Image (cartoon, rainbow, N blue to C red):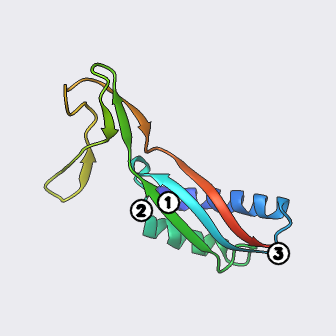
Amino acid sequence: MHEFSTAQGIVETAIHYAKKNKAKKVKKVFLEIGELTFLNVEQLKFSYDILSKDTILDNSELVVEVKSATYKCMKCGASGKLGKIENEDHFSIPVFHCPKCGGEIEILSGRQCFIKNMEIEV
């Protein structure tokens, strides 16, 4: 369950920047994650709520925006959103080859996880 350790890092970082900006209370933390992190948003929010108890983040809202993965083909130069296939268990699996030529691709986005912004009371 990497959601818990990710939430721990988010809470520590948010507390650090809240204190640095002399916040009395944090109302919202805006997070951007890429779909290739494979983070479960509900588990991440649950972990965040547990870890933020009795801190400056207590009762704050974690607002998560999931960004699609994008690629560029190293062979033909095509680019766009990374395709997916569904397996028999109904899980989406990313396709890591160019849908046009089958060539090797470079992942441009989709692996990120960062705090974009915070809404605080000073």
Q: Which numbered dot is residue 78?
A: none
- Which residue lies most toward the top here? 75
Tell me the CA gap for discs 3 and 2: 30 Å
Mark 3 vs 2, N-terminal side: 3
Q: Mark 1 points at which residue?
A: 3
Under mark 3, the amino acid is Lys
Q: At numbered mark 3, what does the secondary structure look like: helix, strand or loop? A: loop
Circle 2 sits on which residue? 40
Residue ID at (13%, 55%): 88
Q: Nearer the viewer, mark 1 or mark 2?
A: 2
Rendered residue at 75%/73% (across/down): 56
Q: Which of 36 and 79 is in front in this view?
A: 79
Counting residues from the N terminus, which is met first, the one under dot 1 or under dot 2? 1
- Image location of residue 43, percent across then percent down: 46, 68
Horizontally, residue 88 falls left or right of residue 50, namely left
Where residue 4 appears, as percent x and y from the top left, is 53, 62
Tell me whether circle 1 and circle 2 mark residues in contact (CB < 8 Å): yes
